[in-house]
């Protein structure tokens, strides 16, 4: 048997085990008094991801009925979205650097000019994407 503690959204935040964290009824009661709830082996398997990631791909939480239910869809924060844009920009820029180095070694002025133009486009797209996100 497990004793699990859940936050206000139903997400499991802590677990204690009979025989590991408590052995007596008094020790168990201490955890119950701290807000831990008895959780069956089957329900616990959902909370730790042993029954998949649920319909939304975000796992399971404890529902209002006390049973595992699909966790809501995670809506990324502005900072998370911004980081995705930055990561993509850096990856695109690194790829261009590599191509530019090849063009330098080959002394290919035409390819270097194309890559510079492509870099300007990537920078403009980055600026526009960040500005749109911040609005």
Image (cartoon, helix red, strand yellow):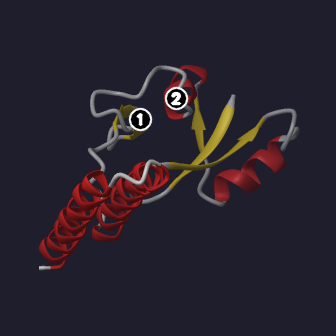
Apparent side of residue 97 relative to residue 133 in the rendered image (left or right) = right
Q: Nearer the viewer, residue 76 or 111?
A: 111
Q: Nearer the viewer, residue 58 or 26?
A: 58
Q: Residue at x 65, y 60 (%)?
A: 34
The circle drawn on residue 49 is 2
Q: Residue at x 73, y 50 (%)?
A: 29
- The x, y position of residue 55, in whole percent, is 28, 27
Q: What is the secondary structure assignment of the residue under circle 2? A: loop
Q: Residue at x 47, y 51 (%)?
A: 98
The circle drawn on residue 59 is 1
- The x, y position of residue 10, in whole percent, is 42, 49
Q: Residues within 10 Å of mark 1 (few under 14, many from 20)?
A: many
The circle drawn on residue 132 is none
Q: CA distance from mark 1 to mark 2?
A: 6 Å
- Whether residues under marks 1 and 2 lie with C-beta atoms below 8 angstroms apart, the answer is yes
The extreme front residue here reads 107
User: The C terminus lies in which quarter of the figure?
Assistant: bottom left
Dividing the picture into quadrants, the one containing residue 130 is bottom left
Q: What is the secondary structure assignment of the residue under circle 1? A: loop
Residue 17 shows up from this direction: yes
User: The N terminus lies in which quarter of the figure?
Assistant: top right
Q: Nearer the viewer, residue 34 or 80?
A: 80
Apparent side of residue 6 relative to residue 20 in the rendered image (left or right) = left
Q: Is residue 81 above or below residue 65?
A: below
Apparent side of residue 126 relative to residue 102 in the rendered image (left or right) = left
Dividing the picture into quadrants, the one containing residue 28 is top right
Q: State which tag comes first along the sequence, 1 or 2.
A: 2
Dividing the picture into quadrants, the one containing residue 9 is bottom left
Residue 10 shows up from this direction: no
């Amino acid at each position: 048997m497990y004793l699990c503690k859940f936050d206000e959204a139903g997400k499991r935040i802590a677990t204690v085990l009979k025989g590991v964290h408590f052995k007596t009824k008094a020790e168990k009661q201490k955890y119950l008094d701290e807000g831990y709830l008895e959780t069956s082996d089957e329900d616990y398997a959902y909370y730790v991801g042993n029954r998949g990631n649920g319909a939304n791909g975000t796992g399971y939480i404890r529902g209002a009925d006390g049973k595992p239910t699909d966790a809501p869809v995670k809506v990324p924060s502005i900072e998370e979205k911004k980081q995705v844009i930055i990561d993509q920009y850096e990856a695109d820029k690194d790829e261009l650097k590599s191509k530019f180095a090849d063009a330098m070694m080959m002394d290919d002025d035409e390819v270097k000019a194309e890559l510079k133009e492509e870099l300007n486009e990537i920078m403009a797209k980055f600026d526009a994407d960040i500005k749109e996100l911040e609005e």
